[in-house]
Image (cartoon, rainbow, N blue to C red):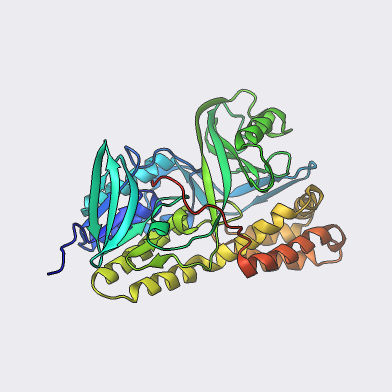
Amino acid sequence: MATRADYDVIVVGSGPAGAMAALRTAARGLRTLVVEEHPAPGTPAHCSGKIQVHAFREFGLPGELILTALRAGTFYGPGGSVARVRRPSPDSFVVDRAEFDRWLAARAQEAGAHLALGTRVRAAQREGGLVRVTGERGGRTLSATAPVVVDAEGARPVLPRALGLRLPRRMVHGLQYECTGVDVECDDCPELYLGRAWAPGFFGWLMPLGGTRARVGVCVDPRLTDRPPAYFLDRLIREHPVASRRLRAARVRRRLGGPIPLLAARHRTSAEGLIVVGDAAGHVKATSGGGIYFSLIGGDLAAAAAAGYVGGDRSALAAYERGWRRRFGRELRATAAARLALAHMSDADVDAVVEAVASDRRLRDAIQRRGDTAFQSRLLAPLVAHALRPAHLPRLAGALAALVRYGLRALWDDGVAEENEGGEGNR
């Protein structure tokens, strides 16, 4: 006699990907368990809370979660260049990430999902056609089985390796301070600070939250520096010619940080009884480190695949792979190519790009008309076309060379150097 499973689906992690997967599976009538490491969903928060307008439309997210709308951006080059772009309508909204995660987890509970909070997953194994997940909760062992597990652990998942799934990864490290008393120039315009002195391999940012509140942060590539993000963030606050003025009277309310995974887009994200989604699967734009919208899409697709798998459709896992690659796989590949190129550009090349945007109205118009922070690949062709114009080509030759060289490398192998696949934690 076949062993009866404790649940139909076990979801590990209650972030956007996990909570969406749990909401959708529970709404389908599947017995759903959500295992969350922390005592409450949304803690600790790790990101700036920027979510594209597409997510609000597609998933019916409520407006009361919105702190501020974003429709512009200012880019500060390492040599003093400045470029500003502004769209006629909002591109994204900023939310309180902890509140957003709690809201989504509450919807999953209302649909019937059971939450096991304060539970750290330690291992998983297949037995008798099921997957057994083992963890610790308050000094006691939790052990539960299901035909399928949706792994939404976050940047350093435990389960894929335990269940024989190889996920090479490259990590960048982020840190941000949530502050009050910030001299915010414009509520709808985040600022990006470029240059190796401030954020090697990535960038610094100031994200308005409304009034004098803002999040200021940096992300750095550890392959380009052995200094921690805190060194660069404190330096940005003290010494950056623009950020230091904005933050001279700021008070830090809390510190948020963590690794951001940039994974190879071609690697499998499912195996027998396992579906990997969100940060755990590398569903992150390599240019910005953002991934909430893609995590929601992935969670929705994972739920459909889990329902099919539990119902006996073994092709459901392949459908999940095809589904997320069709929806945003091109964006992961394109942003991996762009990130690798940007990380290898000199500061002079970065300044040349910023100056070109600032000085060329046609290029700026193309960005403002076609720019979409969720689907950044749409800008690649117009940007390259403008860069090849005689007026820009001499000063953008270095940037174009980096884009070609490292872009092709990223398209070949995603530019991901393997790091330790292990790690701790689920969220």
In screen coordinates, is 257 left or right of 65? right
Q: Is residue 84 above or below residue 305?
A: above
Q: Is residue 61 above or below residue 258?
A: below
Q: Is residue 11 above or below residue 49?
A: below
Position in image of residue 108 (x %, y %):
27, 52
Observer-nearest of 401 and 130? 130
Q: Quadrant of residue 319?
A: bottom left
Position in image of residue 80 (x %, y %):
79, 41
Position in image of residue 353 (x %, y %):
76, 54
Observer-nearest of 90 and 306? 306
- Could you tell me which quadrant the N terminus lies in? bottom left
Observer-nearest of 251 and 199? 199
Q: Residue at x 19, y 61 (%)?
A: 5
Q: Quadrant of residue 413?
A: bottom right
Q: Is residue 293 above or below residue 135?
A: below
Total residue callouts: 0
Q: Residue furthest left?
A: 1
Q: Is residue 114 visible?
A: no
Observer-nearest of 337 and 112? 337
Q: Is residue 386 visible?
A: yes
Q: Residue at x 53, y 65 (%)?
A: 265
Q: Quadrant of residue 269?
A: bottom left
In screen coordinates, is 163 left or right of 32? right
Position in image of residue 335 (x %, y %):
61, 60
